[in-house]
Image (cartoon, rainbow, N blue to C red):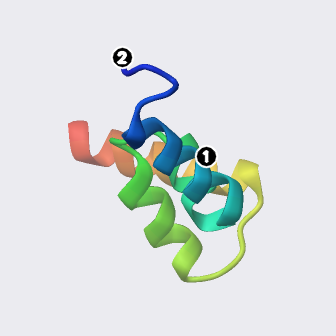
Amino acid sequence: MRKKTSTNALNEKLINDSCGMARALSILGGRWKPAILCRLNHGTMRYGELKKNLLKEFLNGCW
């Protein structure tokens, strides 16, 4: 964990506060980020649709 006053933490805060995309990427989990962005790149999806779509992919990949 870094200090809140470190240069990296201050830069990250500045970027997240000024850019909505950077903020969204920082919130999304690391493992799911590419899959979520790939789905949303093809068009708008409701949360339930996105969840079902990702769950289906996860189950197909694991079985």
Q: CA distance from mark 1 to mark 2?
A: 30 Å
For the point 36% across and 16% down, the residue is 1
Q: Earlier in the sequence, mark 1 or mark 2?
A: 2
| Side of 39 relative to 58 (left or right) | right
Residue 53 spot, x, y in % from top left: 54, 55
| Side of 20 relative to 57 (left or right) | right
Residue closer to the observer: 11 or 56: 11
Q: Label 2: state its secondary structure.
A: loop
Residue 19 spot, x, y in % from top left: 65, 66
Q: Which residue is mark 1?
A: 51
Query: Within 10 angstroms of label 2, few (less than 14), some, or many (20 or more) residues?
Result: few
Q: From the image, state whether disc 1 or disc 2 is nearer to you.
A: 2
Residue 44 vertical placement versus 2 (above, below): below
Residue 39 vertical placement versus 52 (above, below): below
For the point 40% across and 40% down, the residue is 7
For the point 53% across and 79% down, the residue is 41
| Side of 12 relative to 62 (left or right) | right
Residue closer to the observer: 42 or 62: 42
Residue closer to the observer: 62 or 23: 23
Residue closer to the observer: 61 or 21: 21
Tell me where residue 20 sits by quadrant: bottom right
In the picture, the disc for residue 1 is: 2
In the picture, the disc for residue 16 is: none
Q: Amino acid at mark 1?
A: Lys
* Quarter of the rendering occupied by the C terminus: top left
For this orientation, the residue located farthest to the bottom is 42
Q: Label 1: state its secondary structure.
A: helix
For the point 65% across and 81% down, the residue is 43
For this orientation, the residue located farthest to the right is 46
Residue 34 spot, x, y in % from top left: 37, 59
